[in-house]
Image (tube, helix red, strand yellow):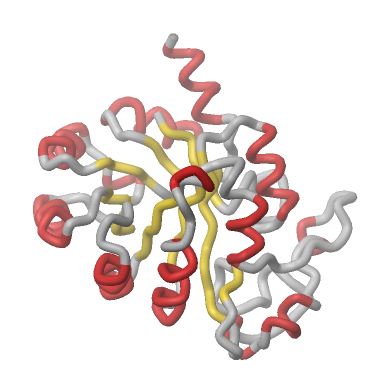
Amino acid sequence: MRNIAHRGASAHRPENTRAAFDLAISMAADAIETDVQITSDGELVLFHDGRVDRTSDGHGPVASYSLDEIRRLDVGSWAGGDLGSQRVLTLGEMVDEYLPRIPVIFEIKDPRATTALMALLGDVSASEGHWEVTSFSWGALLDARAITPDATLGFLSPVLDDDIIGRCVAAGFQQVCPNVQALTAEMVQTAHSADLVVRAFGIQTPTDIDRLFATGADGATVNWPEWIPGRQVMLD
């Protein structure tokens, strides 16, 4: 069961920050997932929401900020604790600092970031780290496939059914990434028979972890990187 730290160890540290990524690595997560957005001056940054309000001391859309402006935001103090301020990371910093240490899954939040993202990742050799790309945007993934045909891509979907599985296979994607609540053993087996990896999202409770194992899913993004190994120990 692949244990993917969602925005880092985001249940314990401010999401998409060095603090969250460092903790995920220390907790032996199998991979880190993060989110890619684009600034007003065309720079790629790691930020989940379309607006900065929830996780910073700023206000307004991410895309309304220049790189210099968004780097001034404090994205750590909102979570409390003794970490102090944290700053928005760029895609380049993630690639340079973390990709050599742990596989990274980049979720395209703003489709306008796709071309620049794939261009940068296309320059990363296998020896420099393993990366994958996911998105809820079908168009962004098709664009990613056109730019980098051998990229590992996964479609994020609220459902898992024959239609979604068939579309992912036809598009040449390697993964289907449904909400955990959509998982059934039958549909996971159908996806596996089509050579798709099934990687869930939306984990909220330990019961959701039980569902991963019961249905035969391959992994999930989790805010609590300790949950999947803890359940695995119980099963062993």
Name the residue at 60% across, 71% down: 45
| Front position in the image: 3 or 91 | 91
Confirm whether residue 204 shows in the render.
no
Quarter placement of the C terminus: top left
Residue 212 picture location, percent across and down: 35, 33
How many numbered callouts? Answer: 0
What residue do we see at 23% from left, 55% from top? 173
Is residue 230 or residue 106 the one in the foreground?
106
Where is 186 relative to 229, above or below?
below
Q: Give left or right: position of 68 versus 218.
A: right
Task: Name the residue located 66 percent from the left edge and 62 percent from the top edge.
Answer: 93
Q: Where is residue 154 in the image (x, y as percent from the top left)?
A: 31, 55
Which quadrant, please, contains the N terminus? top left
Q: Is residue 155 visible?
A: yes
- Residue 189: percent from the left, percent from the top? 16, 34
Q: Which of 78 and 102 is in front in this view?
A: 102
Q: What residue is rendered at 36% in x and 45% in y?
A: 200
Is 205 or 78 nearer to us in this picture?
A: 78
Q: Quadrant of residue 164?
A: bottom left
State left or right for residue 167 relative to residue 10: left
Q: Which residue lies furthest to the top in this view?
A: 236
Q: In which quarter of the image is residue 69?
A: bottom right
